């Protein structure tokens, strides 16, 4: 989740970008523990290897689209890699696994609204098994693909006219699609059969 400027600079200039002593304000920023500040206001405090963030440390974003964001955790070759916590300036937070700068593996993402996802990620998207609890009490438990409910799952409705109703079955791109069962809050089965794009197939 490093900003585009940082990634492009690393690709173009390589480790020489970080080997400059100008930004190293304390410690060893080449092969050791040190504090490094970037020209755009980004700051990293932690372990370095060959002039790159490598090991445990804290990266805080300065000016740019990620301004105010902070990552605390493991790094590899200048990118988030391993276990870490990413706190957004908006109040959102991700705690979990990273690979090559992306959320990948198991993690928990909490939104400022109170919604929460706990489960598997791939390339920064919910992918695999997971549980999404919405701020209104609605809950989806099941399979995800590229950020959407896709495969087998269970959706329990939250507050509103359908509160307590439940759908158990197949999903496609976040909608009821395939074979599924819909029951109301009293446990009464209202429909069993095929669904398409969120609606029963009569």
Image (cartoon, helix red, strand yellow):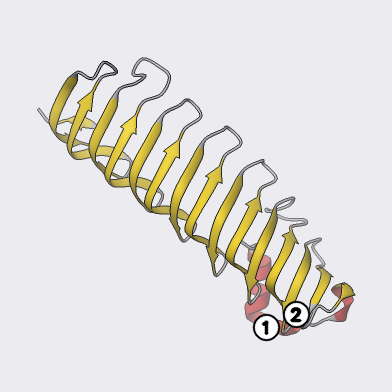
Question: Looking at the picture, does residue 30 appear above or below residue 127?
Answer: below
State the residue in front, 18 or 144: 144
Residue behind mark 2: 17
Question: Looking at the picture, does residue 40 appear above or below residue 196?
Answer: below
Q: Within 10 Å of the Cα at label 1, are there few (<14), some (14-19), or many (20+) other Cα atoms?
A: some
State the residue in front, 57 or 22: 57
**Quadrant assignment, res 176:** top left
**Quadrant assignment, res 175:** top left
**Residue at the image point whose x is 79% and y is 66% from the top:** 45
Q: Quadrant of the N terminus?
A: bottom right
Circle 2: element type: helix
Question: Looking at the picture, does residue 14 appear above or below residue 185?
Answer: below
Seen in the image, is 170 located left or right of residue 78? left
Looking at the image, how many numbered discs can be counted on the residues? Answer: 2
**Quadrant assignment, res 138:** top left
**Residue at the image point whose x is 29% and y is 41% from the top:** 153
Q: Is residue 197 visible?
A: no
Seen in the image, is 90 located left or right of residue 102? right
| Alpha carbon distance from label 1 to label 2 | 6 Å
**Residue at the image point whose x is 78% and y is 62% from the top:** 42
Tell me, for residue 14, which label it has, or none.
Answer: 1
């Amino acid at each position: 989740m490093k900003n585009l400027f940082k990634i492009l600079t690393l690709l173009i200039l390589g480790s020489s970008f970080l080997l400059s002593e100008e930004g190293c304000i304390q410690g060893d920023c080449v092969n050791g523990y040190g504090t490094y500040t970037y020209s755009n206001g980004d700051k990293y405090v932690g372990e370095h290897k060959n002039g790159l963030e490598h090991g445990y440390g804290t990266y805080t974003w300065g000016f740019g689209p990620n301004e105010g964001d902070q990552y605390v955790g493991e790094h590899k070759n200048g990118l988030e890699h391993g276990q870490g916590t990413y706190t957004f300036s908006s109040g959102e937070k991700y705690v979990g696994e990273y690979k090559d700068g992306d959320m990948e593996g198991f993690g928990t993402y909490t939104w400022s609204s109170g919604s929460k996802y706990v489960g598997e990620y791939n390339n920064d998207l919910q992918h695999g098994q997971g549980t999404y609890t919405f701020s209104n009490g609605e809950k989806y438990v099941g399979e995800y693909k590229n950020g959407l409910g896709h495969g087998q799952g269970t959706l329990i409705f939250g507050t509103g006219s359908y509160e307590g109703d439940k759908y158990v079955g197949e999903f496609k791109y976040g909608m009821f699609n395939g074979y599924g069962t819909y029951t109301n809050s009293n446990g009464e089965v209202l429909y069993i059969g095929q669904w398409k794009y969120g609606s029963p197939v009569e």
